[in-house]
Amino acid sequence: MAKHLIVHLKDQCISCGACAAISPDFWEMDEEGMANLKGSKKVGEQWELDIDSEEARATNQEAADVCPVNIIKVVKK
Ligand code: SF4
């Protein structure tokens, strides 16, 4: 299983809550009402998390697909 990187452009989040609703193991809404990718680290202007299972890839791809402003990316490493 290839590793993937989840990328979140948090600054552009419109606080719709869709990612946290569809993939709560990875996504939550923070105290400011913005989505937070659990366990991610800030790298430049974006937040990143390495994942290594197909299950994690699939659920984060669902989050990416429902994000109305397309600020969640699942990138193959
Ligand atoms: S789906 Fe996108 S816009 Fe909505 S809360 Fe999640 S990251 Fe923010």
Image (cartoon, grey):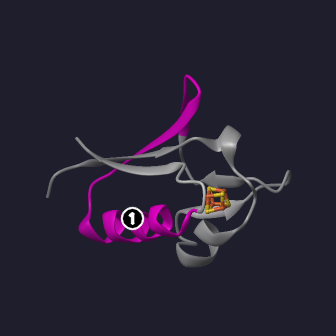
Query: Residue 59's x, y, as percent?
Result: 41, 71
Q: What is the residue that sits farthest to the right in this orientation?
A: 32
* Left or right: residue 4 compared with residue 48: left
* Left or right: residue 51 compared with residue 2: right
Give above or below for 61 relative to 69. below
Q: Mark 1 is on which residue type? A: Gln
Q: Taking the image as four quarters, which one is ligand 1 found in?
A: bottom right
Query: Residue 5's x, y, as percent?
Result: 35, 45
The residue lying toward the viewer, choosing from 42 and 64, is: 64
Query: Residue 49's x, y, as percent?
Result: 44, 45
Q: Quadrant of residue 28?
A: bottom right
Give above or below for 21 relative to 28. below
Q: Is residue 62 magenta?
A: yes
Quadrant of the image containing the C terminus: top left
Quadrant of the image containing the N terminus: bottom left
Range covered by the magenta-colored residues: 41-67
Density class for disc 1 (Cα within 10 Å; few <14, some 14-19, many ≥20) is some
Q: Residue at x 60, y 62 (%)?
A: 68
The residue lying toward the viewer, choosing from 25 and 5, is: 5
Q: Residue at x 36, y 65 (%)?
A: 56
What residue would you read off at disc 1?
Answer: 61
Q: What is the residue that sits farthest to the left in this orientation?
A: 1
